[in-house]
Amino acid sequence: MSKGPGLFSDFGKKARDLLNKDYAADHKITVSSSSDSGLDITSNLFTKGGLSSGDVATRYKFKNGSLDVKFVTDSNILTTLRATDLPSSTNVIASLKLPDFNSGKLEVQYFHEHAGISVAAGLNHSPAVDLSATIGTPTIAFGAESTYTTVSGNFAKYNAGVSYSTPDSNASVILADKGDSIKASYLHHLDLLNKGVLGGEISRRFSTNENTLTVGCSFLVDPQTVLKAKLDNHGSLGALLQHEINRQSLLAISGAFDTKALQKNPKFGFTLALKP
């Protein structure tokens, strides 16, 4: 466990990753390589809805950070500079999407034994400012986040929540959408059951009285294979199989089914990540 409460964006992240991460409805092939000098190169090819796109990303690692440059097929260039421990316990992240020079953004993250603070602002004439703060310990933390728009002089959003973590479990409750919705999540590790993980998330939107409940699980079939599944109260069933081809290559196959409308075609996706 970390030495501090982390950032507000970490609240409920483990449960969200269990229920959403690596599930895909498109096709993706990734080929990556790295050198001893600290340069990593990754090529991605996507196919979605009959349309193909791709990108080439490079990452250069240096002592206290990294520089990422991504070339996308829509003629955009994404750059991200990360600097860690500058000064101690402080991270600085600067990003820019070319040729849109107004897309620049600067974020500063500060980590303390009993607090975590993040401030981000757009690098333009009328930026939006994102601010989040947490206080507590690695076990229990309280936090809030907000976005202030300088154009209107109003807060576009403000959320607040609490997180409770132990080595085997994680739980969080977040009041979001300016108090219009509440979301609670829970995740538990079952190390005795093939390193299984069980989790769920329930959300309610007060303005529409809409409730959504999603439960999911993950466990090791063997040391190289992971099986995941999830189901929500609207009848959407998802399954994911990940297999480690070798120590650096991974194959993932996922599918989604509507159990309340079995006449609809299921959605399938796969990801193949190769690193020679």
Image (spheres, rainbow, N blue to C red):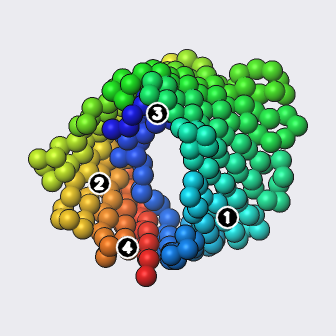
- Amino acid on which the number 4 mark rests in the picture: Gln
Instruction: Please name which of the two marks, 4 or 2, marks the residue nearer to the observer.
Output: 4
| Res. 248 mark | 4
How far is disc 4 from disc 1 in space, using C-alphas?
Answer: 22 Å
List the residue tagged with mark 2. Answer: 228
Q: Position of residue 221 (x, y in %)?
A: 18, 62
List the residue tagged with mark 1. Answer: 69
Against 64, residue 9 (above or below) is: above
List the residue tagged with mark 3. Answer: 6
Against 124, residue 36 (above or below) is: below
How far is disc 2 from disc 1 in space, using C-alphas?
Answer: 32 Å
Q: Quadrant of the C terminus?
A: bottom left
| Residue 247 appears left or right of 161 | left
Between 20 and 250, which is closer to the camera in this rendering?
250
Mark 3 or mark 2, which is nearer the start of the sequence? 3
- Amino acid on which the number 3 mark rests in the picture: Gly
Q: Which residue is found at the position 37% from the left and 73% from the top?
A: 248
Mark 2 or mark 4, which is nearer the start of the sequence? 2
